[in-house]
Every structure is written in C-alpha cells, then in structure tokens.
Image: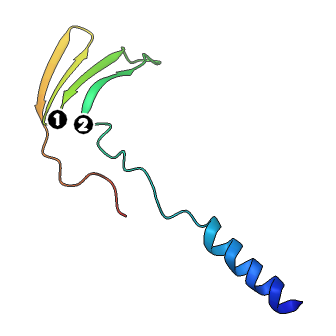
Amino acid sequence: MKKVLFILAGILLFTSCKTDFEDNSDRFKVGVFKIPAGKGFVEETIIRKDSIQISKHGNHVDTLSIKWKNNFFTP
C-alpha cells in the first residue's frame, strides 16, 4: 500500500510541475505607455517602436534611441 501511495505521489509531483511558460519579454518594446500625473509631476506618454522612444511630458517632446541588451528574461 505504501508503495502505491509513493508512486501516485511521484506521478502527481511530476505532472503538477509546469515547465512550459509564455515568453512575453518583448511586450515593452512596442506600444504606447502612459505614466499618470502625480504630485509635482505631469502626465507622460511614451511611444515606443523597438529601438526608438518618443516621450511627451507637458510641453516637452524627447526622442531616444534604445539599445536592448537582453529581453529581461532568463529561462
């Protein structure tokens, strides 16, 4: 009986461990992001297209070049 319980526990342990995961590390490389206004800060809108970022805050517009070193993701 102990042997059967041990085998069932082992099967349950191996089947419950999820090794597949979704790699969504590129989600910040493209898109429009908004940072809401806070105390002493104005709202900022960031438009990002891979290696180019346009940042609009108040009456200022900044353009940045981004070099991605990694995807912030380690399997």
Dot placed on the residue nearer the N-terminal end, 1 or 2: 2
The image quadrant where one finds the C terminus is bottom left
Q: Viewed as shown, does residue 11 lie left or right of 33?
A: right
Q: CA distance from mark 1 to mark 2?
A: 5 Å
Q: Where on the picture, by quarter, is residue 64?
A: top left
Residue under label 2: 29
Residue type at tag 2 = Lys
x then y, percent, for residue 24: 36, 45
- Give the structural element (helix, strand or loop) at label 2: loop
Q: Where on the picture, by quarter, is residue 30?
A: top left
- The tag on residue 37 is none
Q: Viewed as shown, does residue 31 lie left or right of 52?
A: right
- Give the structural element (helix, strand or loop) at label 1: loop
Depth order, front residue of 3/31: 3
- The tag on residue 50 is 1
Residue type at tag 1 = Asp
Depth order, front residue of 36/24: 24
x then y, percent, for residue 26: 29, 42
Tell me, yes or no, whether the two marked residues, 1 and 2, touch with CB atoms within 8 Å.
Answer: yes
Disc 1 crowd rating (10 Å Cα; few below 14, some 14-19, many 20+) is: some
The image quadrant where one finds the N terminus is bottom right
In the rendered view, would you say 20 is above or below 34? below
Hey, which residue is sitting farthest right in the picture?
A: 1
Which residue sits at x=24%, y=36%?
29
x then y, percent, for residue 19: 49, 64
Hey, which residue is sitting farthest top in the picture?
A: 59
Which residue sits at x=30%, y=36%?
28
Depth order, front residue of 40/36: 36
